[in-house]
Image: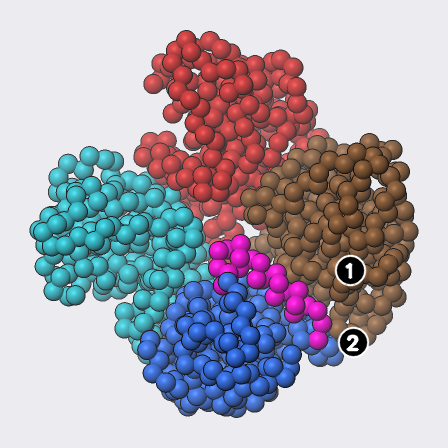
Chain colours: A blue, B cyan, C red, D brown
Amino acid sequence: MPTSMTEAFRELAMANRIVANEGVLDAFGHVSMRHPDNPKRYFLSRSRAPELVEPSDLIEYDLDSRPVRDAGATQYSERVIHGEIYKARPDVMSVCHHHAPAFMPLIATGADYLPVFHLGAVGGIRPPYWDQHDEFGDTNMLLIKPEEGASLARALGAHNLVLMRRHGVTAVGTSVRDCVFRCIFSARNAEFQARAMAIGTIASLSRGEAELSGKISTSTTGLTRSWEYWSVRLGRAGLMIPEARVVRPGQRAAAKASARGAHKAPLRKMARRR
Amino acid sequence: MPTSMTEAFRELAMANRIVANEGVLDAFGHVSMRHPDNPKRYFLSRSRAPELVEPSDLIEYDLDSRPVRDAGATQYSERVIHGEIYKARPDVMSVCHHHAPAFMPLIATGADYLPVFHLGAVGGIRPPYWDQHDEFGDTNMLLIKPEEGASLARALGAHNLVLMRRHGVTAVGTSVRDCVFRCIFSARNAEFQARAMAIGTIASLSRGEAELSGKISTSTTGLTRSWEYWSVRLGRAGLMIPEARVVRPGQRAAAKASARGAHKAPLRKMARRR
Amino acid sequence: MPTSMTEAFRELAMANRIVANEGVLDAFGHVSMRHPDNPKRYFLSRSRAPELVEPSDLIEYDLDSRPVRDAGATQYSERVIHGEIYKARPDVMSVCHHHAPAFMPLIATGADYLPVFHLGAVGGIRPPYWDQHDEFGDTNMLLIKPEEGASLARALGAHNLVLMRRHGVTAVGTSVRDCVFRCIFSARNAEFQARAMAIGTIASLSRGEAELSGKISTSTTGLTRSWEYWSVRLGRAGLMIPEARVVRPGQRAAAKASARGAHKAPLRKMARRR
Amino acid sequence: MPTSMTEAFRELAMANRIVANEGVLDAFGHVSMRHPDNPKRYFLSRSRAPELVEPSDLIEYDLDSRPVRDAGATQYSERVIHGEIYKARPDVMSVCHHHAPAFMPLIATGADYLPVFHLGAVGGIRPPYWDQHDEFGDTNMLLIKPEEGASLARALGAHNLVLMRRHGVTAVGTSVRDCVFRCIFSARNAEFQARAMAIGTIASLSRGEAELSGKISTSTTGLTRSWEYWSVRLGRAGLMIPEARVVRPGQRAAAKASARGAHKAPLRKMARRR
């Protein structure tokens, strides 16, 4: 886990690239993280394909999804998804919105997501669906207004995944890595499920199995092992972000190497967690 | 957007490669652009797999799909698709004909294309089908005669996509990038749709949603973001075309760097648009 | 087209690699060619994954599939497929046997192959099926005995493709490139067909359309264009075979650069065709 | 076949990478081998994505899946799968546990595995299913307790493959290469079978055909040919493990180059087999 803001920014940029490199994101979609020291702030890239995100692309937002200072760049139009979920769910430290091909057969038919193997339990059993049309009628399907984000956050409720009809998916996590793990393995499960539905009747994990298995991503060594794996694959694809040079307390890296406008103060929570 | 013919030729060659690199084209298929300064002309590569197209492969055609000067190379047999659409549709600045694998389940069964997520709206709702056999009986399925191209253009009408039974797809755009975006995201949608149809009943965007969403490719930052993404992926695949050296007005690059027989006069429309 | 045996051997090795690199062959399967100057001989690699075949791996066989001289290497067990077809079909100059994943849904269910787009016409309409069990009962499914190869050749008849139940496919061509084109585009068609069958009722090309379209691979520029494309892709995958150095008549390359035991005499037919 | 422990360790690390590189394993799953000289011991990597396993990651276990000496690293939680199978099946020299995407449609619906082509015979006809819930009720689906491993081994019985409901697959082999071959070609077969089931009724090899074909992986040249192929592909993916330097008897490589705690004594069985 990151122990400085520099590392945290690199991890968030890596997360965007990893989720893209594993086939969940393409030109669209984004992963954000809550400010580790200030729960009323979050970081999200400027408008850019997630596979290309650099630490220096990150913008700091308040929970109303307004940049804390001049963003100096084009912003994602759907950032209210992130801000409104961070408002509604204090336990959430990372959010990812995507249109993973693996999920589309479910999204397009309204089929319930069901964990068909233990790793799919990170998506829960029958996570809720949300339909923008129900509350907002005909739109361009983008969540741009705060009330659209808030409506999605209400649908998400206490779940970790919300499926968006005719659109995509939003997933949350207790950390960036937890969120990445959930995105990738729920997409794998969705793919297995759709292919299985084409040939027979699927069996879901029992509720008990899903609850026990769902903790895998945070309580076992799987998270470490998979992050190493995805990082090496990122490197093989020529997408690795070099580690920032080691910085000692009081010698923080220059602003360029961190996000635009990130606090320069030493980490509190993150340092404590170390 | 390109501001010189040199840049425009590079953009068109890149477009051919990008649409191939993203899995829409293979050994066959082609992207053309209307001459930005002369609506009665268009540019299309000599007969070559689109992934390999160089700016120097481009040939200038009149709207009857005759090369303006000696082509000096083998030409695509289906170029009337391009010429006849440019004739019929003054608003169209770019045309792509392809046999994307993603579309084939629809093409082979005659199923209507329906946007199952917002980005699929670039293909419209139920774009028309065209069947060469209806008007021309048994053929080798290639559109070689002007009347075959004209028949297809009539079927296309005011739509942006026309599906060709037992053959493929033709898409149009208001710019090269708009056309590329339409090809790639309509193919993604077709894939999602076919996989969804294998497991249930699909829901389409409403007409209102499709109209509002369909403008995404031209009116938001999505076009810029996706072009950057696809270009970087092209580079990673070793397929990037290096930028031509900067040329000042009056110092146009040598003919080699531009298309065969392209006008050497300064750009009018394109320059004005800058 | 090759104009020397050195070039012909390189083309055959390239053909094996191309068909593998395009996803038709894997660790198994093989492409052969008839000796251009001696219709009673053919060339086939020693037992090796096709993606790795070198010109120096080629062995010269008589039509009873016996090596003309000491093979000096492990041989494919199924070479009678090639020999028996060359015996039965004087027009055939190249044979490929494969287990393409794209064909497997048809092979496993016994569904007829139907051309669902013009390029699929290279496989014909409803090419014959052959079942080794019909004539030979329980076997290990490999065609090892001459009579097994002869039985397959009878089933092939005058067709260009024969489907083998619970096994794979054998395709033929009037040249190595024609055979490669048939393998790749019939596999594409089979994939489109299977995916289409999962969502609806497929439409086939009419018999007239199939006949006219089926000539595409030999009578248009498509063959040249696709060979260049597949070769470049081979190069990008790091699998290209360097061109042998130019040899003038009377200065034939050393035996190493050609197949084991190939005739050193100047080409007759091939030279004439130039 | 390896003739020294150094080579055997390299082969096992390669096996993990090959099975991953061919799409059977991802961040999870593992291949083990029984100690060639001591049937009461086996080797398995420390907890790490299989694509990244180095010879130096291997840990020596007794059949109760306890490390023979201080492991000095995080261990796989499911190692009892390996230990309990080695206990129950003296003929088994290698075990692989995986969640191959290709198998998931079967695993999720409970459909029987059937060989739909000769190479699929390595999985047998209708290998047994095991359901952890039957004996152990709600669990996190991981096999952690010895009795869970023993239960799986009982279900496996004399078969070479056991399917695990809502989880994955475990396969065994008479050598590391035999196990790798079984994993890869049974996964190919499962993929073909699932895609075939979506469009029709599948035909299985007869019992006689399956028995005769099932020996292909050990009795023909196929094993050598496919191992060379997969190794070269590993190299192309940048994942090759360099051959250890040649060591003469009495000059064994340093401990670093071999597994942690491997016996330094000269090989007995392996040497004899040479």
Q: Secondary structure at mark 1?
A: strand
Residue drawn at (46%, 20%) of the image = C6
Residue drawn at (53%, 57%) of the image = A235
* Quarter of the image that includes the N terminus of chain D: top right
Residue D226 vs residue C208, the one in the foreground: D226
Magenta residue span: A219-241
Residue A204 vs residue D16, the one in the foreground: D16
Residue drawn at (39%, 53%) of the image = B234
Q: Which amino acid does the dot numbered 1 rest on?
A: Tyr
Count of numbered tags: 2
Left or right position of B152 against C191: left
| Quadrant of the rendered image containing residue B142 | top left
| Quadrant of the rendered image containing residue C53 | top right
Residue C167 in the image: x percent, y percent? 63, 39
Is A123 magenta? The answer is no
Chain letter behind tag 2 = D
Is A229 magenta? The answer is yes
On screen, residue A60 above or below C97 = below
Residue C10 in the image: x percent, y percent? 47, 26
Q: Which residue is mark 1?
A: D129
Do the residues indicated by labels 2 and 1 lie within the same chain of the protein? yes
Residue A273 vs residue D131, the one in the foreground: A273
* Quarter of the image that includes the C terminus of chain D: top right
Residue B66 in the image: x percent, y percent? 15, 42
Q: Is residue C207 visible?
A: no
The dominant secondary structure in magenta is helix
Circle 1 crowding by C-alpha within 10 Å: few under 14, some 14–19, many from 20: some
Chain letter behind tag 1 = D
Rendered image: mark on residue D138? 2
